Image (spheres, helix red, strand yellow):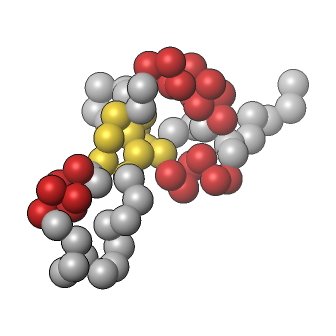
């Protein structure tokens, strides 16, 4: 049986929590933070992946 390969883009964007769920980092948190509102910065933290998408993305990154 051939090796399972992880999707390169997905493995850069997803990580697994201690309980096994997948989380991703939201956008707009890298630079130009002084002019963004506190609310905008607070909302853009890491977020749990929605359960409906989790099944498909577990196949993209089987080794995380």
- The x, y position of residue 58, in whole percent, is 57, 28
Question: Does residue 26 appear in the picture of this structure?
Answer: yes
16 on left or right of 18: right
Residue at (37% x, 28% y) in the render:
21
Residue furthest to the right = 1
Residue at (50% x, 18% y) in the render:
52
Q: Is residue 63 above or below residue 7?
A: above
61 on left or right of 19: right
Which quadrant does the N terminus fall into? Answer: top right
36 on left or right of 50: left
Nearest the eye: 32 or 21: 32
Residue furthest to the left = 38
- The x, y position of residue 36, in whole percent, is 22, 71
Question: Does residue 62 appear in the picture of this structure?
Answer: no
Q: Classify residue 38 by image quadrant.
A: bottom left
Nearest the eye: 25 or 37: 37
- The x, y position of residue 11, in whole percent, is 57, 49
Q: Is residue 39 above or below residue 30?
A: above
Q: Is residue 2 above or below residue 29?
A: above
- The x, y position of residue 56, in whole percent, is 62, 25
2 on left or right of 53: right
Residue at (38% x, 52% y) in the render:
25
Nearest the eye: 4 or 32: 32
Residue at (44% x, 19% y) in the render:
51
């Amino acid at each position: 049986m051939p090796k399972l390969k992880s999707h390169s883009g997905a493995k850069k964007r997803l990580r697994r929590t201690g309980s096994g769920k997948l989380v991703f980092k939201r956008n707009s948190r890298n630079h130009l933070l002084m002019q963004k509102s506190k609310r905008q910065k607070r909302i853009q933290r890491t977020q749990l992946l929605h359960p409906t998408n989790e099944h498909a993305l577990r196949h993209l990154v089987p080794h995380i």
